[in-house]
Image (cartoon, rainbow, N blue to C red):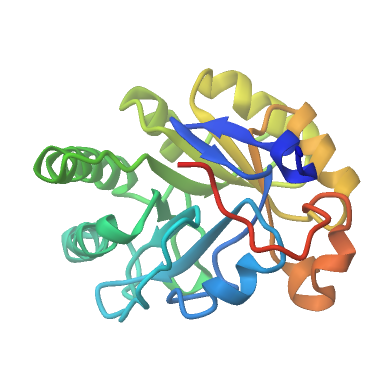
Amino acid sequence: MTRARDNARINAMGLTFAGPLGVAAGVDRDGSRIVSLDLAGFGHIEIGTVTPETAMAERPRGLRIGVNFGSLRPGLDDVVIADYCAALRAAHAQADYLCANLTSPRGGRDGDTPGVENLLRRLRPQRDRLAERSGRRAPLLVKVAAGNGEDAMPRAIVEARRLRFDGVVLVCADLRRIAAVKAFIGDLTLISVGGVATARDVSARMKAGASLVQTYSAFVANGAPALRGAVPATNEPTRAAV
């Protein structure tokens, strides 16, 4: 018999997700809460932000996991970029996809911070070398706040498109801006996060061009019932197709 969640599967970045809605980074910073989050029925869980100092918990098999990575240091100088590269290397074996975080208030970084192009230029070949050695290619994305419709496109998004990253995790609640970013990045995957509190929000983000959607504040405050209809109606643990 076909289950409700089987009809909600999403294909993105060469991966199959059990549903469109996932948990944003920040809820589970090191992977220690993956099992309990999986029981809520989410299609993916993005852990982090992990840094070279993070001791990541071993991930259970069969879950769709993204790893958001960065640095504890401020700015984007060569030392910070080296931190990002080290965190990427450490996370690669655990991650179905990897996401370079440019939205951490602690780091004082955003999509236009000086050095952002150099960061992305260093990360892409780093991931490619790991893929060659391991025989497994983890999609690489960048997480950026989008601003509003009158702002210029963040340089990180421009560079991610040029370098053919696999996608962008976009922090934005403006549907028109989401649609504009999706039009700009073309066939790269867009994951939408920020202000997602209901199943209607999930649907609206996908209509604007997002392939996947993430929730954070609404889930932390109210739990999965706040997003009823956006996650599978089942008590069975979600298992992503492999």
The residue at 64%/63% (across/down) is 237
Q: Position of residue 9 (x, y in %)?
A: 65, 36
Q: Position of residue 206 (x, y in %)?
A: 74, 33
Observer-nearest residue: 239 or 168? 239
Residue 86 lies left or right of residue 155; in this view the side is: left
Q: Position of residue 122 (x, y in %)?
A: 19, 44
Image quadrant of residue 170?
A: top right
The number of numbered badges drawn on the structure is 0
Q: Position of residue 205 (x, y in %)?
A: 76, 37
- Residue furthest toward the left? 133
Quadrant position of the C terminus in the picture: top left
The residue at 47%/75% (across/down) is 106
Observer able to see residue 149: no
- In the rendered view, tell whether residue 4 sits above or below residue 159: below
- In the rendered view, tell whether residue 10 sits above or below residue 187: below
Image quadrant of residue 91?
A: bottom left
- In the rendered view, tell whether residue 134 sits above or below residue 162: below
Observer able to see residue 45: yes
Residue 32 lies left or right of residue 86; in this view the side is: right
Observer-nearest residue: 187 or 225? 225
The residue at 42%/42% (across/down) is 141
- In the rendered view, tell whether residue 211 sits above or below residue 194: above
Observer-nearest residue: 93 or 60? 60
